[in-house]
Structures are given as structure tokens and as C-alpha cells.
Amino acid sequence: DAGVIQSPRHEVTEMGQEVTLRCKPISGHDYLFWYRQTMMRGLELLIYFNNNVPIDDSGMPEDRFSAKMPNASFSTLKIQPSEPRDSAVYFCASSQGQNYGYTFGSGTRLTVV
Amino acid sequence: GEDVEQSLFLSVREGDSSVINCTYTDSSSTYLYWYKQEPGAGLQLLTYIFSNMDMKQDQRLTVLLNKKDKHLSLRIADTQTGDSAIYFCAESLDTGRRALTFGSGTRLQVQP
């Protein structure tokens, strides 16, 4: 398996623009997680899905952020409109069942100027 | 509440042992994990321990869990320059909430 695949690896956009981050989890994994990593706040859970259904989105910063999982092999995280404070590395991770940890993607480094 | 704390930085010489420490506050932790993050990469699962265990060894890695003190440690024997990275501990809780809570990470620097 190729692991968790995220795209793009890097994204530079202007403030106010829409940004869409993409994730393909490992086949057969039933949980998918979106995390954000910054120097100031560390790793923050944004949202997670179980069997394509959002379970906990309490970490989503505000209404500008939305996430979808239309099927078991694809998820998106959208920011509209983007702001400079959204600049961070966004990670997607997936897991199968409970208690064996996650497999992380390589992340998307987002810079909003 | 959920709170996982780690020291920020550790420097060791190549060949020495490294010990990275972590404390957590939630007594309902079921599994505790150690992840490694190299520059520009995602987090890689190194090892994990179930909360009813007090030690787990995996090659150069030894995990010690003191559940009474809510203290977790990762010992890396014969530390190599390739071990230089950020190490995160994380816990999962027996509350039905599936997501892991991560510490802030410890940057390990291995000097030749």
C-alpha cells in the first residue's frame, strides 16, 4: 500500500482565496483524521470521520473550515476564505479499528500571504 | 481533561542512551503511543503500550509506563544520528472518543 496520500505537498495562496486539501486514506481503514500543526499550538485535531461519517468536528476553527468524506477513499478539507493565520502544516491520518495508532500522510504545507 | 506534556528538547551524544519523558493527566488512557517526526515528514508510529502493561521492548526502544504517576518514557539505546527527530507521545482514552491527544513533542538532537 502506498500509505496515506495527501495533495498538494505545498500550497501558497493569497488571503481570501479558497484552498482545498486532499487526502486518500489507506484502503480498508475506517477512520480518517485531519490535524493541523503549528509551532505555537502543536498538533491540533480538526475533525475525524468513521466510515465516512463526521464524528467530531469540535476542533474546526470556524465556519471558514469544512471537511467532507464522500467515500471511503477520499476526503477534502476546505478553507474559504483563507487567512494568514491558517498557515500551517495540515496532516491527514487513517487507522483501522481501535488502538493501533494512526498512519499519517506527509502533510500539506499551507502558506497564506 | 486531556493534557499530555513533554519536555521540548534533548541533546545526546551518538552511542549514548536517550530517554524522552511524557506525562499525561487522564487516568482513562487505554493505549499510549510514541511517534517520530523527521523534518518535512509526517508522524511515524514507533511503538505503543497498553495501559495495563508497565514495560515494552522493541529492539533499541524500551517503553516504560508508570500508571500511578501517569508517566511514560521512551528509551532509545545506542542512539544514532538518524534518530534525530521530534518525538511525540499520545494517548487514547476509554471514553469512546477515538482521536488521539498528542503532546507538544520533544526534539532529540544527536551529536556525533
Image (cartoon, coloured by chain):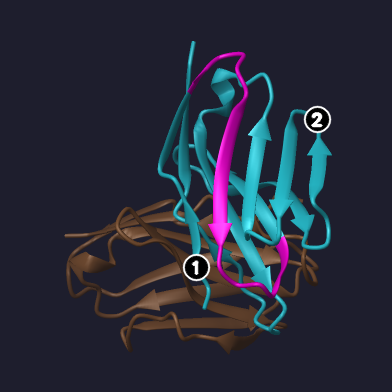
Left of A72 or right of it: where is B38?
Answer: left
Q: Which residues are magenta?
A: B12-31
Which residue in the structure is indicated by mark 1? B3
Residue B27 on the magenta span: yes
**Do the residues under discs 1 and 2 have CB atoms within 8 angstroms?**
no
Which residue in the structure is indicated by mark 2? B59
Name the residue: 59% across, 34% down. Answer: B19
Tag 2's secondary structure? Answer: loop
**Magenta stretch: helix, strand or loop mostly:** strand
B5 or B48, nearer to the observer? B5
Tag 2: residue type? Answer: Gln
Name the residue: 55% across, 86% down. Answer: A56
Which percent across, then down, holds residue A27? 77, 64
**Cα gap from disc 1 to disc 2, whole angstroms:** 29 Å
Left of B58 or right of it: where is B72?
Answer: left
Q: Residues within 10 Å of mark 1 (few under 14, many from 20)?
A: some
Of callouts 1 and 2, which one flags the residue occurring earlier in the amino acid sequence? 1
Q: Tell me the quadrant of the picture where the C terminus of chain A can be found.
A: bottom left
To which quarter of the image does residue B77 belong? top right
Which percent across, then down, holds residue B28? 69, 75
Q: Check the image and report above or below for B59 versus A57.
A: above
Which percent across, then down, holds residue A83? 21, 71
Tag 1's secondary structure? Answer: loop
User: In this orientation, does residue A105 appear?
Assistant: no
A30 or B23, nearer to the observer? B23
- Farthest residue to the top: give it: B112
Color of chain B here?
A: cyan
Which percent across, then down, holds residue A110? 33, 58
Among the chains pictured, the one given brown colouring is: A
To which quarter of the image does residue A5 belong? bottom right
Q: Residues within 10 Å of mark 2 (few under 14, many from 20)?
A: few
* Co-location on one chain, circles 1 and 2: yes
